[in-house]
Amino acid sequence: MKKNYFFIFLFALTLAIPNRMHAQVNSDWQPIFLLVTGGNIMNGVEAFFQLNTCNGEDIIYVKFFNHNNKPVKLEWSDAVFTQELKWINRDKPGDKKSLIIPQNTEFKGECGNSLYPELLIKVKDFVADKKDFKRYSASRLTVIPVQ
């Protein structure tokens, strides 16, 4: 009888472990406020950021999801809101970023993946210490349909 309980326990354990190992927590991603109302969806494009590290360096990861049924071109400048409640903008002409995202597709910055360097921002380019960082914004974001 004890063998049956052991095998039932072992079976239940094998079912539970893979689910926990592959669970993905999206709570680390915070919305990028694209609208005055605080919304993070503009013209069918949803935006998020995440503060994390990559190779020991503090990085802001950006994620865009194009919900449109056509590709779009995004154009924006990076901006950081500090703990002192001040915006630091990188809005010179050479600082402008752009990216074309296919329809119904997500692009996100990832450590070790250099496909989308526009989506990785070094915190030290804005503030000396990540403790001074409060929020990221894709300043002056425009969403342009691609023909």
Image (cartoon, rainbow, N blue to C red):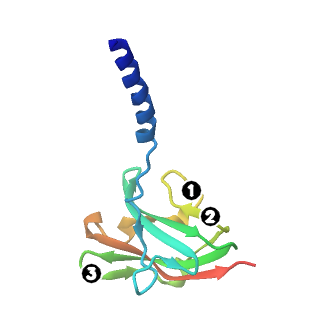
Give the residue pinned by disc 1. Answer: 114
Residue 79 point in image, percent of width and height: 41, 77
Q: Nearer the viewer, mark 3 or mark 1?
A: 3
Residue 127 point in image, percent of width and height: 32, 71
Give the residue pinned by disc 3. Answer: 85
The count of marks equals 3
Question: Disc 2 residue type?
Answer: Thr
Residue 6 point in image, percent of width and height: 36, 18
Label 3: how many Cα within 10 Å (few below 14, some 14–19, many 20+): few
Badges 1 and 2: C-beta atoms under 8 Å apart? no
Question: Disc 1 residue type?
Answer: Ser
Q: Secondary structure at mark 3?
A: loop
Inter-mark Cα distance, 2 to 3: 33 Å
- Considering only order in the chain, which callout, 2 or 1, is on the residue closer to the N terminus? 2
Q: Is residue 98 left or right of residue 130?
A: right
Residue that protrudes farthest toward the bottom in the picture: 36
Disc number placed over residue 70 in the picture, else none: none
**Residue 135: quadrant of the picture:** bottom left
Q: Is residue 48 left or right of residue 94?
A: left
Q: Secondary structure at mark 1?
A: loop
Disc number placed over residue 105 in the picture, else none: 2
Toward the viewer: 126 or 71?
Answer: 71
Residue at position x 41%, y 35% from top? 16
Residue at position x 36%, y 80% from top? 88
